Image: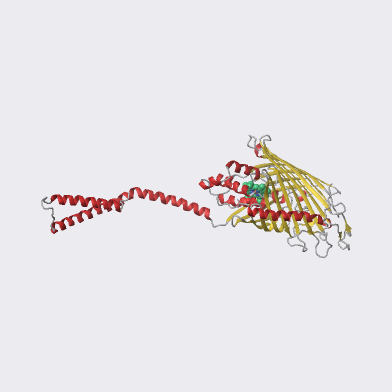
Amino acid sequence: MLRSRVESKNLIPAVATATVMLIGLTILGCQRPETTDRKAVEPEGHPQAQAEAVPIKGRAQMWSENCMRCHNIRDPKSLSDTEWQVALHQMRVRGNLLAEEHKGILELMQAGN
Amino acid sequence: MLIRPKTTLVVIATLWMLGGGIALGEQPDSDNVVSREEYDNLKKEFEAFREQMLKTNQNRAPAKMDQETQEYLQYLETELGVVKDLALASQQGSTKFLVTGYATAGFTDRRGENSTFDAGFNPIFLWELNDRLLFEGEIELELPGDAETETNLEYANASYLVNDYVTVGAGKFLTPFGIFNERLHPAWINKLPDRPLPYGSEGGLAPVSSTGAFVRGGIPVGKTMKGNYAFFLSNGPELNIGDVAASEAGSLKFHNNADSNNNKAFGGRVGFLPIPELEAGYSFMYFQAQPDGFTNVDVVLHAIDVSYIRDSDALGGVIDARFEWVWSDVDDATYDADGSLGFGPTRFNNSRDGGYAQVAYRPSKNGNKVIKKLEGVVRYDWLNNPNGAPESFDEERYTCGLNYWLTPSTVVKAAYQMDNKDNGANDADAFLVQAAIGF
């Protein structure tokens, strides 16, 4: 049986590292072009969506790699475009998805329903 | 086709000229001069002719429009209707709403207890206020054995996507400590009908949800690897001093919604995915747990988790393996110092640990319609409690289950559990059945 006693002072480096990391990420994230904006996402058939979308293969791979990590994959047809948008917003937060995964998978679900 | 004014003018001009030509042609060639009277007569004649022409044109144009244009107008009207409907359907204001959640129906036959049915309903409300702002709320409706329907606010929080790597939020949220509570506990996701011991709702070592604020996100590591993090600051759980039951002395009350002291809990988890199928995580949580008037008690919780999920042709389906180990280290303290509670004074080394290892396999690529929907699960879970604590015992269980998936989020689970407790506590083997729907 493993029993580790960790003194609270051991947490100080951990907290400091986490804080520095977060500040770094916030600054880095704010400088990078944002993929959070989903204006390019249009219903299937819209030429703009085809032109700006993540390639199909990449999107399908993102889907299979991410969406079965916690639960079974659901049929894209099970939700409407708007419902997918809301459900995937929750998954983005819960599953700590990358922004491009969020965008690519949303496009795939909306194209496949 | 519409008759354009320009065309009309050309026609008129031509007619005029022709008319003029004819008129002129009627004149004697000799003097080429037209009298005023002749001119006026001709003019009148021509005006009459022109009017007649215009009238004919006016009468003929609508007749032509009726045929072609009306068809076209009708087509436009239908198209416009479709477009209008589409626009209205996708408009729905600028906020988007989704009601989801899950429901369960279960049956438990545990040795030493009366067998019982149970049911639960957990509606979840998701509200996307804009591309960055999301509210999520879950209400848990349960049927406790001895009371009316119990309502719990499982979570209610708003989160904001600050940028690609950072999301912040506040409210009551599933605690990102370990993975079971945050990712696996909903009945349509959990592959067995009950919770593993370290995450048990009674006697567990970690909080299900916390009230406070969080920051989280995912980050790419190199080209193919990924990392993720979630940190939170929240109300801290409270130490059980044994005033309700001696057996609870030294354990933690995770359900307190208001903090018992001014020292907030700080915790979080960092995860790393070297390959998409594999994730390893480390979680920690630090807080002070003493209630008012009790000596300071520092608590440190740690956990590690490993998940491996692979959908492979070679395996003929999906293999889902999980492992978690949680350590709880609570400062030693003297319980029932004055003996008024009837079990003290007592002091013990208040360290606990518990974990589970679970493997599930579903032959989803099998040609048989029934076999491909079956899933076998085995889980070993354990919980070690402090030896010196009142009425304390260690426990380990082996659980085997068979699931039948009707849809990706509808499952019927049956499991048998072998229980093993030390210190003379009763082993409570159990037969568990649960049907769960995620919607």
Where B308 sits versus B213, above or below? above
Task: Return the residue nearer the eye: B222 or B329.
Answer: B222
Q: Is residue B238 left or right of residue B155?
A: right
* Residue B437 visible in the displayed image: no
Where A112 sits versus B142, above or below? above
What residue do we see at 21% from left, 51% from top?
B17
What residue do we see at 88% from left, 62% from top?
B337
Task: Return the residue nearer the eye: B12 or B118.
Answer: B12
* Quadrant location of the C terminus of chain A in the rendered image: top right
Q: Position of residue A6 (x, y in %)?
A: 82, 53
* Residue B348 visible in the displayed image: yes
Q: Position of residue B395 (x, y in %)?
A: 82, 48
Q: Position of residue B437 (x, y in %)?
A: 64, 48
Q: Position of residue B202 (x, y in %)?
A: 77, 53
Q: How many marks?
A: 0
User: Looking at this rendering, what residue extends furthest in the front direction?
Assistant: B31
Task: Return the residue nearer the eye: B254 or A88.
Answer: A88
What residue do we see at 60% from left, 46% from top?
A104
Q: Is residue B103 left or right of residue B258?
A: left
Task: Return the residue nearer the eye: B304 or B118.
Answer: B304
